[in-house]
Amino acid sequence: MPSPKAQENDPDRERQLIEAAKHDPRHFAELYDAYFDRIYAFSIMRTRDREAAQDITSEVFHQALKNLSRFEWRGVPFSAWLYKIAANAIANRVTRNTREQTGSPVELAPESASCEELEAIEQRADIWSLLRDLPADQRRVLEMRFVEEKSIRDIAAELGRSDGAVKQLQFRALQNVRDRLTLTGDRHG
Amino acid sequence: MAERDLIQQLDQAVMAMLVGGPSVETGVETGPEVTALLRIATAVRDLPETDFRERLKRDVIADAINAIKENSMTATTPETAAKSWMPEGFRSLTPYLLAPSSAKLMDFMKDAFGATELARHRRPDGTVMHGVVKIGDSVVEFGENPQDQFGARPTPLHVYVDDVDATYERALAAGATSLGEPADHEYGERGAGFRDAAGNHWWVARGFTPEHTAGLHSVNIYLHTQDTPAYIEFLKRAFGASEEMRHEMGGRIAHARIWLGDTILELGEASEPWGPMPCAMHFHVPDTDATYAQALAAGATSVTAPMNAPYGDRFAAVLDSQKNYWYIATHLPG
């Protein structure tokens, strides 16, 4: 099965997906799958706030679906259009919040993502994709520790394991992701 | 450094990272191994909440379905385009129940679900060759033929009803065997299950919210599949299917919703006690010959090559890798 990344890097496939979604909006699900990780990564990295990142990601995909008929494929990646919607949503949010708090104008991040930012987004998307293939117990420990921000003790109690076993699972899970990431990197040269 | 020490060092650095900012610089002294793992950890820290991805996807697709409905009066969409190739009242995908006794099955559906009889075609010996009923907003077909090459094929069905408890009671009174008493489920619905005398599994449910059932109809086919990711790819290649969502548990697809034409096919990886239940489906398409060729190219096996059936359909049948029969049909008007 081609990975979302492979789809994004294949302009013909991307064009087909966009045309299919324009014809029948239910096909938008495939575009969503291909770009969700990148848009969420862009949003969380710019806002550093989970709730804001969720709101922005949600806004991006609802807007993109609504305005898909206006998207013209001219060789510009679909992701660039999505990043632009996300950057606008973030700018609106920052402007609104700053005005409410200080009444002063704000300096906004650029609309398009920089090369460093794109690299970090790709890295996150790759890592999150690898996480989905981890053994269930390793993945669950990482979610509890890093997303739910639970202590080792709380995780151990919830899973019925010792503190040491949870720490070991955390270590193994991160090692596993790193090894698979290295393998993927080697394969892609 | 011993692994035990590395594990401990990593945990201290993770703790410092969680307390501090998003940077890899935690202030905790670490060797290259732990530093590399910590870089992974910073990306994991940004991971979306477990169910956010699927929740938002469902919202967005519900939006797409609403957009189609809103445009239905003014635009030509897949929902509203003239479908002369589909018999009136049908949708793209219809369950086709093959039972030892069609008459008994029809009585059961009437008793349990208040099904309305739409058609009954008898053979000279009085048995029902082909029957059609409506349950809620959905058409269900069924047939009986001991000589039929397709044999009896119980089907797993997910049926939305107004009152789960009352339907369950009526079904048991009509001779069904319980597969699960009515209960509220954390995935968003009250549900119960029973098996009829022909072996069909009926999972009756009522969603807690309208969003939960967006896109679904009264009667939905719910396949128990093996190697589900590969099967979904087959559906895409063979029938132009589109995946709406998949929910994974323990590395397996516990539930997926796949659009085939205007209908959602639900499926999940078979696991005990719910093993594979290969069944039969009637799939209406604009061009039977093209779909048949596409299905064979995707790996399906031919059962019946395209032919003009006496009842006015262009018809073909294929068998997929999971032993499900697909009756591909294009209604020929006039």
Image (cartoon, helix red, strand yellow):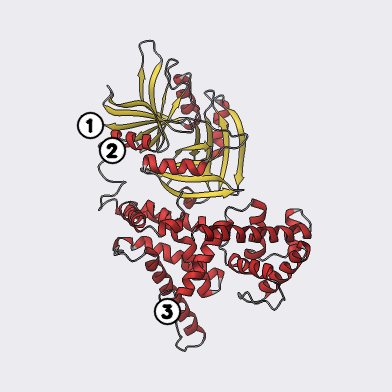
- In the rendered structure, the answer to whether residue B311 lies left or right of residue A34 reads left
Precedes in sequence: disc 1 or disc 2: 2
Circle number at residue B333: 1
| Image quarter of residue A64 | bottom left
Question: Which structural element holds mark 2?
Answer: loop
Q: Residue at x 45, y 27 (%)?
A: B97
How packed is label 1: few (under 14 Cα within 10 Å), some, or many (20 or more)?
A: few
* Residue type beneath disc 1: Pro
Question: Mark 2 highlights which residue?
Answer: B286
Q: Quadrant of residue A152?
A: bottom right
User: Mark 3 belongs to which subunit?
Assistant: A
Q: Residue furthest bottom?
A: A104
* Distance CA(mark 1)–CA(mark 3): 58 Å
On-image quarter of the N terminus of chain B: bottom right
Residue A153 seen: yes
Q: CA distance from mark 1 to mark 2?
A: 12 Å
Judge the density around disc 2: few (<14), some (14-19), many (≥20) Cα neighbours within 10 Å. Answer: some
Judging by the rendered image, the residue that carries numbered circle 3 is A110
Front one among A146 and A188:
A188
